[in-house]
Image (cartoon, grey):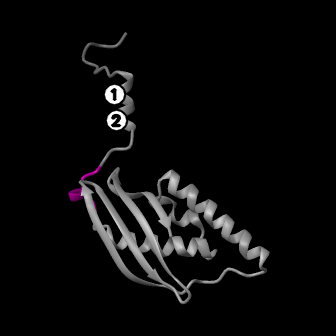
Amino acid sequence: MPSSATPRHRTYEIQDMFAPQRTSSANLPNPTPLLATLAGGALEVIAGVRDVDQLARWLAEEPYSRLVLRANLAARARSARSQTAKQPIYHLRRLISSSPADGIVEATAIVTMPVRTRAVAMRLEGIDGRWRASSLTVL
C-alpha cells in the first residue's frame, strides 16, 4: 500500500513528462551552421555519396522518410543510366532564414551547382534542447 507521501500522477501527466518538449530559441545554439549542413547533406544524400542515416539525428520522421524515398529514386535512376554516385560540386550561395515564432526557424538555402541552381527549404523546431528539421524539401 503506497504511503500518503508518495506523489501520485495521472497517466496523461506521465505521458506529458516523457513527450518531446519544446525548447525556446534562447536555449538553443545558432541554427545557421545546422541549416548549411542540412542543405549540403540533403544534396549529397540524393547524389548517393552520403547515407541518410548520417542526417537522422537532425531530421524528424517525415522529412527523414521523404529523403530516403528521394535517395532511392535517384539511385534507381542512376542505375538505369549505368552511372555511379559522385560527390556533387555545390556552393551555398545564400541562406535566408526567419523566426516566425519562438523555437522555430524557417529557411531557404540557395545552392548553385555546375548545371543548375537548387533551393532547399527547411523548418527547424527546438525540441528537447536541440534543433530538429520538421520539414526539408529539395527543389
Q: Residue 17 has which mark? A: 2
Identify the residue at horizontal 34%, vertical 76% (top origin).
95
Q: Are marks 2 and 1 in contact (CB under 8 Å)?
A: yes
Image location of residue 105, percent across then percent down: 31, 61
Inspect the image, locate mark 1, and give the three-letter code of the amino acid beneath it: Glu
Marks 2 and 1, how far apart at CA? 6 Å
Inspect the image, locate mark 2, and give the three-letter code of the amino acid beneath it: Met
Front-lying residue, 100 or 40:
100
Q: Mark 1 points at which residue?
A: 13
Image location of residue 135, percent across then percent down: 44, 58
Mark 2 crowdedness (10 Å alpha carbons): few <14, some 14-19, many ≥20: few
Q: Residue 82 has which mark? A: none
Quadrant that contains the N terminus: top left
Q: How many marks?
A: 2
SS at badge 1 = helix
Q: Which of the 4 quarters of the picture holds residue 20?
A: top left
Q: What stretch is highlighted in magenta?
A: 23-28
Q: In this view, does 43 lie to the left or right of 35?
A: right
Identify the residue at horizontal 54%, vertical 90% (top origin).
114
Q: In this view, does 82 lie to the left or right of 110?
A: right
Identify the residue at horizontal 37%, vertical 29% (top origin).
14
Front-lying residue, 84 or 9:
84
The furthest residue to the left: 26
**In the image, is residue 114 above or below residue 80?**
below
